[in-house]
Amino acid sequence: MPSLGWSILTPFRDLLEPIYLAQLTSILNSSVLAMDETPIRAGIKSKGKMKRGYFWPLYGDKEEVAFPFAASRSKREAEMILGAFCGTLLTNGYTAYAGYAEKRDEVEHALCWAHTRRGFVKSEDVEPDRSKKALEQIRLLYEIEDEIRSKRLEAVAIQEQRGSRSKLIVAEFFEWLKDEMAASALLPTKPFTKAANYALDRQKGLEVFLSNPDVAIDTNHLERALRPIPMGRKNWLFCWTEVGAKKVGWAQSLIATCGLHDIDPYVYLVDVLQRVDIHPFERVEELTPRFWNQHFGKDPMRSRLKRHAD
């Protein structure tokens, strides 16, 4: 159950909805969007059992995240959240995302190498030689990405590095996988076979990052940003209602985005919860963390208790 602090904040979380929606709109207008899904127990099902709902974390190209809540993990929920998104969608291999992208010519579907790598990690104990060979090739890709980050390369330089170095590694990786699958009598239930088929079935999506410097090699940046959700599950276990889960998502979206912009979330929330009622609605995006810092960060509104203490 959410902590007492969350319960006290319930009426104030309603004030965050327009700010959250402005941020969600900004995220969905991204040219590159990362997306994932993570479970949360929300709402009573029967005999004291909780329903299983999902947050669908989104990470845009302007260092903003959102945690929209939905009652299920269905393809329909993904489609409703993404709406008319146009651009590159970076995800894991869950089929709901592929189904959405296939329907929309305006969407390019990129896939996460970290999820691909996990399959070979799982197969390492059973088939160490093949698995280690796959993991070594993937490791080389990540070495290049680490170098790109450490040098803080711009888009043109990133594309040059990926085109001249990563592209060859990726091509050799998939050729090697095809040869292994053709030459060996591998059972479809074997862990290595599952990992290899997962990668081969998603080859096109795994190659997208090679031609677009704005696309990350994986969704690890999103997984780091969504950590408040699994941490919250450990602390408050569940949400009494689906409406409550939705409101938790609003607040966590803004708090997590504060972290991405080096903003103290307490200072931010104290300010916007007082400011939102008097701020022009047509300029509500100024209250999202990305814009709040430049408009109000230097002289934020303080709590009455703080003002009296001073």
Image (cartoon, rainbow, N blue to C red):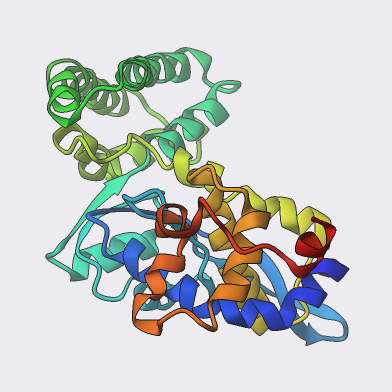
Q: How many numbered discs, if any?
A: 0
Quadrant the C terminus occupies: bottom right
Left or right: 166 as drawn, with respect to 78: left
Identify whether 298 is placed above or below 56: above
Residue 130: image location, x then y, percent: 43, 17
Quadrant the N terminus occupies: bottom right
Residue under the point 36% across and 75% down? 283
Left or right: 28 as drawn, with respect to 157: right
Residue under the point 87% across and 82% down? 48
Identify whether 61 is placed above or below 148: below
Residue under the point 14% across and 64% down? 106
Residue 290: image location, x then y, percent: 41, 55
Residue 136 visible in image: yes
Residue 289: image location, x then y, percent: 47, 57
Identify whether 164 is placed above or below 32: above
Q: Nearer the viewer, residue 141 or 246?
A: 246
Residue closest to the far bottom: 46
Identify whether 219 is placed above or below 18: above
Residue 30: image location, x then y, percent: 27, 58
Residue 71 visible in image: no
Left or right: 86 as drawn, with respect to 200: left
